Image (tube, rainbow, N blue to C red):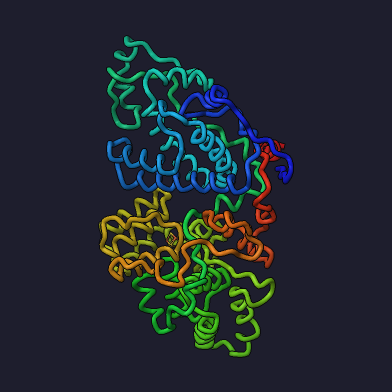
Amino acid sequence: MQFSGNKRRKLKLAGDQKNACYPHSLQFYLQPPSENVSLIEFENMAVDRLKLLKVVENLGVSYVKGTEQYQNKLESEIRKLKFSYRENLEDEYEPRRKDHISHFILRLAYCQSEDLRRWFIQQEMDLLRFRFSILPKDKIQSFLKDSHLQFEAISDAEKTHRDQDIIASSSSGGIKLDLELVYKLTTRSLPTVQSDERLQPLLNHLSHSYTGQDYSAQGNSGKISLDQIDSLAAKSFPPCMRHLHRVLRESHHLRHGGRMQYGLFLKGIGLTLEQALHFWKQEFVKGKMDPDKFDKGYSYNIRHSYGKEGKRTDYTPFSCMKIILTNPPGQGDYHGCPFRHSDPELLKQKLQSYKVSPAGISEILDLVKGSHYQVACQKYFEIIHKVDDCGFSLNHPNQFFFESQRMLAGGKDPKKEPGLPETPQPRPGAAGTPKAREAPSALPALSSSMEVDLEGLEAPSALPALNPSMEVDLEGLEAYFSS
Ligand code: SF4
């Protein structure tokens, strides 16, 4: 990958050239993007596509795919995020360019593990299916031709002859043969991602980043008292944190992964450093730990996570993606995401103990079976709060907590209370430009992860070293990963 602070290779295209670049709203691009984009644009495009794919996932489990409601909602989200979707719209160059570049970035970021690949391909397939379905009939053939896809429409006679086979093979369970063109070899045709198998850690964090608010402690600090924690855990903690809290209360100990995950969550909901030291010491001493040993061995780590030791990095609570995709729990660990890391039978028992109804449990287990872990957690949220639609897309355990508190307070938004941050706060080593501070949270999150890395808590990343004013040479990026 190459980064350049002075070389500008922006595409300056006239109208016709722009149209020639992206002749269709849908694209199977044959060439990777080759222009330079700023790091901020690079990040914003990637985050917007992530948001879109999250919407695709949510809609896919909330509505029957292909129905009018599903199509309308998806179209409106695509429009909101300014991606291309309709063939005959005016002024489509920027949305199509964004479609091209953002797909390329996420393709690189999401090919790194089987879990990531499966999730990415599933959402992209659904998005593609929707966009293909609204392509005007007269454009389909030219789209296939321009994409070098050699699909041949079958004749009416063959269509009639093979109608039962065709209906059985259609994903919607039946197609209207009189209206549809049917193609031979109608297999899945997604851009291949195999060539990206050699990806380096450079894009790791993009695939683990999340697309919501920054849930750092700033502004919340001191908003809860220690004697509230037990009742808050039952009412408003997501299952991952509820579980860690219960284990800590019962066994008076948590291993490193659990302490990090739960400690940063508590910090994010408002535990001050003094409260955290008291809380953890009280529990560990109950577990027969010598108070001196706690002071020497553990209080340093707590002060460290509050930015009072070492590099003085103010660590942010972990997002769902980070919990789900990194550092899986081993024997004797209790961290992780129960929807991702628990045996289904154990998850079922846990949900029963949380008084989730049998019907609710079976809905949740179905979502888990389809690898929709965050959507399963959202369903859990809706069940325990007795709402049909929680109205948000879950990305973060602290988001779960704040949304729950907001709902329990009758809709009053705790995020709007004085002192609570609406926008990501700058972090040591994070981008310093005003634009970077306003940008979605991935960049600050990346930087704070880097600080964690340096303390030996995570694998190293190259991204935080980048200056946001620099540009990313997309052509160089492809070459880098192909070499
Ligand atoms: Fe926690 Fe997120 Fe998993 Fe819910 S989906 S249990 S909030 S990690």
Relative vertical location of residue 357 with respect to residue 55 in this rendering, above or below = below
Whether residue 262 is visible, yes or no, is: no
Could you say where residue 470 lies in the image, as x and y percent from the top left? 68, 48
- The residue at the point 42 percent across, 54 percent down is 373
- The residue at the point 54 percent across, 44 percent down is 45
- The residue at the point 37 percent across, 75 percent down is 232
Relative vertical location of residue 148 with respect to residue 74 in this rendering, above or below = above
Query: Which quadrant, please, contains the C terminus?
Result: top right
Report the side of 404 relative to 423 (left or right): left
Report the side of 469 relative to 363 (left or right): right
Could you say where residue 402 lies in the image, as x and y percent from the top left? 40, 67
Of the pair 336 and 23, the residue shown nearer to us: 23
Q: How many marks?
A: 0
Could you say where residue 50 lies in the image, as x and y percent from the top left? 49, 47
Of the pair 199 and 6, the residue shown nearer to us: 6
Whether residue 64 is visible, yes or no, is: yes
The image quarter containing residue 30 is top right
Relative vertical location of residue 407 with respect to residue 65 in this rendering, above or below = below
Q: Which quarter is ligand 1 in?
A: bottom left
Of the pair 404 and 481, the residue shown nearer to us: 404
